[in-house]
Image (cartoon, helix red, strand yellow):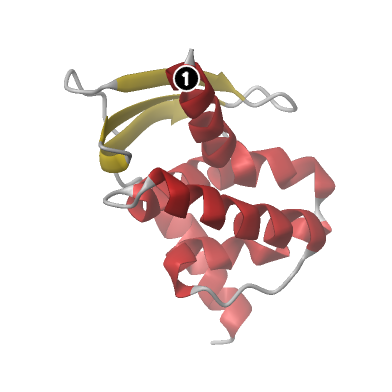
Amino acid sequence: MNINDLYKRVILDHAKNRRNHRETDCYTHKVHYKNPTCGDVMTMYATIKANKIEDLSFVGEGCFISMASSSMFTNIAKKKTIAEIEELSILMKDMILTGKAVDDLRLEDTISLGDIHKFPARYNCALMPWQAFEKLLKNREK
């Protein structure tokens, strides 16, 4: 098995067995987000205390890339600070938009989405949870 086959398996596993895919009544922030290019939708629930993400979950429907990316993102973001997620977001965007190789282990399984840069129509699918979280933070500041 080569690395591309492994990455495909990781993506499919997250798409089929979504982590943190649940509604919750206990949250401090909530955002509904619609992918501007394809119509995938998600609602993200976050519990943020002292600028640290205590819990994060989502519900939604969409293509396997957006749902896998959402599953991966919620795993990564839990127990991280907002500053850490903002830093990782820059790395993720570079990887998806330019194909820049990323070796930061904090990105965990999202590294498997690296080849998405070859498919511009899928950029927003891979970045959907990151964009949703950014929107959640902007709404938080209001």
Mark 1 lies on residue: 141
Residue 31: image quadrant is: top left
- Seen at 30% across and 48% down, the residue is 78
Q: How many marks?
A: 1
- Tell me if 27 is positioned left or right of 61 in this view: left
Q: Secondary structure at mark 1?
A: helix
Q: Nearer the viewer, residue 34 or 9?
A: 34
**What amino acid does circle 1 point to?**
Glu
Give the residue furthest to the bottom: 1
Answer yes or no: is residue 17 visible: no
- Tell me if 25 is positioned left or right of 129 in this view: left
Which percent across, then down, holds residue 36? 71, 23
Which percent across, then down, holds residue 109? 46, 65
Q: Nearer the viewer, residue 75 or 49?
A: 49
Which percent across, then down, holds residue 30? 37, 19
Label 1 neighbourhood size at 10 Å, few (<14), some (14-19), many (20+)? few
Answer yes or no: is residue 131 visible: yes
Which percent across, then down, holds residue 8? 56, 66
- Seen at 68% across and 52% down, the residue is 93
- Seen at 53% across and 48% down, the residue is 86
Give the residue furthest to the top: 142
Q: Pick the quarter of the image with the N terminus.
A: bottom right
- Tell me if 13 is positioned left or right of 47 in this view: right
- Seen at 23% across and 23% down, the residue is 27
Q: Nearer the viewer, residue 28 or 73?
A: 28
Above or below 138: residue 127: below
